[in-house]
């Protein structure tokens, strides 16, 4: 169960652990899911998707909370998989609060939250014990990443545009201009 991904480490209060089980890429977040750790996860998944991988699990068992950028990153992964017409993003180990947040943002159609089945169901603890730290590259373009993730949330569910209107306005998004919700 080895992935050959070598990059420089970034200092964050959260850790990202990865591994593979069959053809599934397992990504575990230990600590808060934030705008700081979502770019390396997004980059990893995009690289793996371009190599043909289509099954991903994000494990949130040791993730006490997520910010909107992190949830928007997951929404973007789910939308890319849907657009491809194949693949699955499964979210496991959620707290009730995390599950409620994902569902409140209308993301449950893009990802399976706490799926009842999967080839890994009987192997979760074995998989978790075999994960390795992700070497993360330098995080650049933080503002662009934050904007993209919030636009993902709005694309996933139109009602999120009002919810994140201030963030979108401050970051100069076309989303608020298109919906006519701002005045110039």
Image: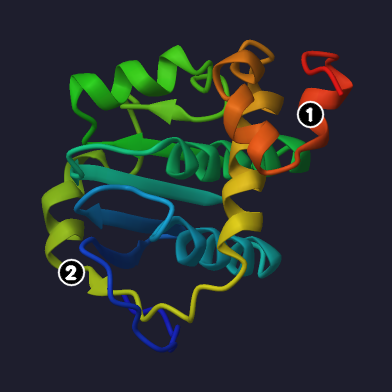
Q: Nearer the viewer, residue 184 or 45?
A: 184
The picture places residue 134, in percent across and down from the top left corner, at 34, 75
Residue at position x 59%, y 27% in the image:
166
> Where is residue 82, by image quadrant?
top right
Look at discs 2 and 1 and give the one toward the viewer: 1
Q: Which label number is shown at residue 175?
A: 1
Instruction: Please tell me whether mark 2 sits on a helix, a strand or a loop.
Output: loop
Residue in front for this viewpoint, 36 or 93: 36
Locate residue 23 relative to residue 98 in the image: left or right: right
Disc 2/disc 1 C-alpha distance (Å): 42 Å
- For label 1, the SS is helix
Image position of 118 with respect to 104: above or below: below
Q: Quadrant of residue 84?
A: top right
Q: Position of residue 34 (x, y in %)?
A: 36, 49
Residue at the location (62% across, 42% down)?
76
Q: Residues within 10 Å of mark 2 (few under 14, many from 20)?
A: some
* Image vertical order of residue 103 relative to residue 4, above or below: above
The image position of residue 104, as x and y in percent, is 43, 13
Residue beneath the point at 48% across and 43% down: 69
The outermost residue toward the front is 184
Residue annotated with mark 2: 130
Count neighbours of disc 1 (C-alpha within 10 A) and say few if under 14, some if 14 to 19, many if 20 or more.
some
Quarter of image, res 158 = top right
């Amino acid at each position: 169960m080895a992935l050959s991904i070598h990059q420089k480490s970034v200092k964050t209060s959260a850790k990202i652990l990865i591994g593979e089980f069959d053809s599934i890429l397992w990504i575990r977040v230990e600590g808060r899911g934030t705008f700081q750790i979502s770019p390396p996860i997004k980059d990893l998944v995009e690289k793996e998707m371009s190599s043909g991988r289509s099954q991903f699990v994000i494990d949130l068992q040791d993730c006490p909370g997520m910010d909107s950028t992190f949830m928007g990153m997951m929404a973007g992964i789910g939308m890319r998989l849907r657009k491809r017409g194949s693949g699955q993003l499964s979210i496991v180990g959620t707290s009730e609060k995390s599950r409620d947040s994902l569902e409140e943002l209308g993301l449950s159609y893009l990802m399976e939250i706490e799926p009842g089945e999967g080839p890994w169901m009987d192997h979760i603890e074995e998989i978790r014990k075999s994960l390795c730290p992700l070497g993360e590259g330098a995080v650049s373009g933080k503002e662009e990443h934050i904007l993209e993730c919030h636009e993902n949330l709005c694309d996933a569910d139109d009602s999120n545009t009002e919810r994140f209107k201030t963030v979108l306005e401050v970051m100069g998004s076309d989303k608020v201009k298109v919906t006519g919700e701002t005045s110039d």
